[in-house]
Image: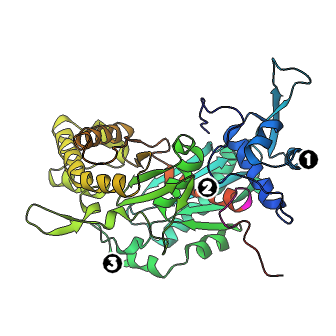
């Protein structure tokens, strides 16, 4: 987990990360304290008090409980200060584990993530339009394999998070078979929880990627950002003031569905231009096939020219949309992740930045576009956050009053 190196000790990791001394708020306070240790560790109890606003007694009680549960560890003492050196606290990576599954139109990926956000083991299969039974078989086979590879006991896994595109069956991508429509009648959480005997949490893939970036990536540097996820389709996610923003119907960031008019004035979805499906379609038309996105960087020069043209087309398609995002939302950054190789994401971001700089002076601010820290497996890692979030992370509605 990356932590900003230049943040002064004791400053809050993000807006809204404050505890409360109200009655019946113990669970919230523990979640806030644990998150403060995750973001700011190694951190002393004194700095935790400053960060969370909790009393010294509350911090002592909470940290002693977390140490007993082995969710945090002692990591030495401060030096160069008067009096007794203060103990520093950090997250225990082995405190618990989570599984993250990403199901998309061209692959299935499963990751085993530790409590510090590091991927301990990974299994992936390149398969086009996998049906529910194929996903279920992959999970059954892969879970035991990953636990064995990571030498992790099954009872230390708190759950499975699933990153799954909304309306996956409706994208109508090239080569999509008619029976793929069955996903529309499948409850993904029920399908997997019955088979794996663990809690299952389902999230939109772009939202999961943005949430993963928020907790374990550049979200430690940027409190507000827009995440562009390039996969077989195109998605987006919005983080504002350190929280994921869902919108009124939970469908914020639906970047791929925005209309884009071609040269003849015909409107098509933005994902028909900016997506791996669009790139692969251009390559296939010239006789080039790749078995996985990683193979894109190894194609011969004529194929690289096709990729270069696709990048220019994507910049043309994204320019106005990103300018609108910058004007309407005013994020600190626009981050690009997904299954494109890092080198191609960097090329796309560089050219988009060059294009956007021409608008400087005509809009309030032009923010940087860059590759996300969790680019490739971002949806799967973000999905693995969901069980952690349910059990350990502070949420927006944690302190809502419940009926007696």
Nearer the observer: mark 3 or 2; the answer is 2
Q: Secondary structure at mark 2?
A: helix
**Quick one: quadrant of the N terminus?**
top right
Q: Which residue is mark 1?
A: 57
The picture quadrant where one finds residue 81 is top right
Provide the residue span drawn in magenta. Answer: 391-397
Nearer the observer: mark 3 or 1; the answer is 1
Q: Residue at x 61, y 76 (%)?
A: 190
Horizontal side of 341 relative to 192 (left or right) equals left
Taking the view exactly as shown, the residue that stands out farthest to the left is 264
Q: Picture coordinates of residue 82 (x, y %)?
A: 87, 20
Q: Residue at x 83, y 62 (%)?
A: 22
Q: Picture coordinates of residue 49 (x, y %)?
A: 80, 43
Disc 3: CA contacts within 10 A as few (<14), some (14-19) or many (>=20): few
The picture quadrant where one finds residue 260 is bottom left
The front one of 310 and 319 is: 319
Dot label at residue 384: 2
Q: Picture coordinates of residue 381 (x, y %)?
A: 56, 51
Q: Residue at x 29, y 40 (%)?
A: 353
Q: Secondary structure at mark 1?
A: helix
Horizontal side of 245 relative to 358 (left or right) equals right
- Tell me if label 2 and label 1 are in contact, CB under 8 Å: no
Q: Which residue is mark 3?
A: 178
Going from the N terminus, do you reach mark 3 or mark 2 first? Answer: 3
Going from the N terminus, do you reach mark 2 or mark 1 first? Answer: 1
Q: How many marks?
A: 3
């Amino acid at each position: 987990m990356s932590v900003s190196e230049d943040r002064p000790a004791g400053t809050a990791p993000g807006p809204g990360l404050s505890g409360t001394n109200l009655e019946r708020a113990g669970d919230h306070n523990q979640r806030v304290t644990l998150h403060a240790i995750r973001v700011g560790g190694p951190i002393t109890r004194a700095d935790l008090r400053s960060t969370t606003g909790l009393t010294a007694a509350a911090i002592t009680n909470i940290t002693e409980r977390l140490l007993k549960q082995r969710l945090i560890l002692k990591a030495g003492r401060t030096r160069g200060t008067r009096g007794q050196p203060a103990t520093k606290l950090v997250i225990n990576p082995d405190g618990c584990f989570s599984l993250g599954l990403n199901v998309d139109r061209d692959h299935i990926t499963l990751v085993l993530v530790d409590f510090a956000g590091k991927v301990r083991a990974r299994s992936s299969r390149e398969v086009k339009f996998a049906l529910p039974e194929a996903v279920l078989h992959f999970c059954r086979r892969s879970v035991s394999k990953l636990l064995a590879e990571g030498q992790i006991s099954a009872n230390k896994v708190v759950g499975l998070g699933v990153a799954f595109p909304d309306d996956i069956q409706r994208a109508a991508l090239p080569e999509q078979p008619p029976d793929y429509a069955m996903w529309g009648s499948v409850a993904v959480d029920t399908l997997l929880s019955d088979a794996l005997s663990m809690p299952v949490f389902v999230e939109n893939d772009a939202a999961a990627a943005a949430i993963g970036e928020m907790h374990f990536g550049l979200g430690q540097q940027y409190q507000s950002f827009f995440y562009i996820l390039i996969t077989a389709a195109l998605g987006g996610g919005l983080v504002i003031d350190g929280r994921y923003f869902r919108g009124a119907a939970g469908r914020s960031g639906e970047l791929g569905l925005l209309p884009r008019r071609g040269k003849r004035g015909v409107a098509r979805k933005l994902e028909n231009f900016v997506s791996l499906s669009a790139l692969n379609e251009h390559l296939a038309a010239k006789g080039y096939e790749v078995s996985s996105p990683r193979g894109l960087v190894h194609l011969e020069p004529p194929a690289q020219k096709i990729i270069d043209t696709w990048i220019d087309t994507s910049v043309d398609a994204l320019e106005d949309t990103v300018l609108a995002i910058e004007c309407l939302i005013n994020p600190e950054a626009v981050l690009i992740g997904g299954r494109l190789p890092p080198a191609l994401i960097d090329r796309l971001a560089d050219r988009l930045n060059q294009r956007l700089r021409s608008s400087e002076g005509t809009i309030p601010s032009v923010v940087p576009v860059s590759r996300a820290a969790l680019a490739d497996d971002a949806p799967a890692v973000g999905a693995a956050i969901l069980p952690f979030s349910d059990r350990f992370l502070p949420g927006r509605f944690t302190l809502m009053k419940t009926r007696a």
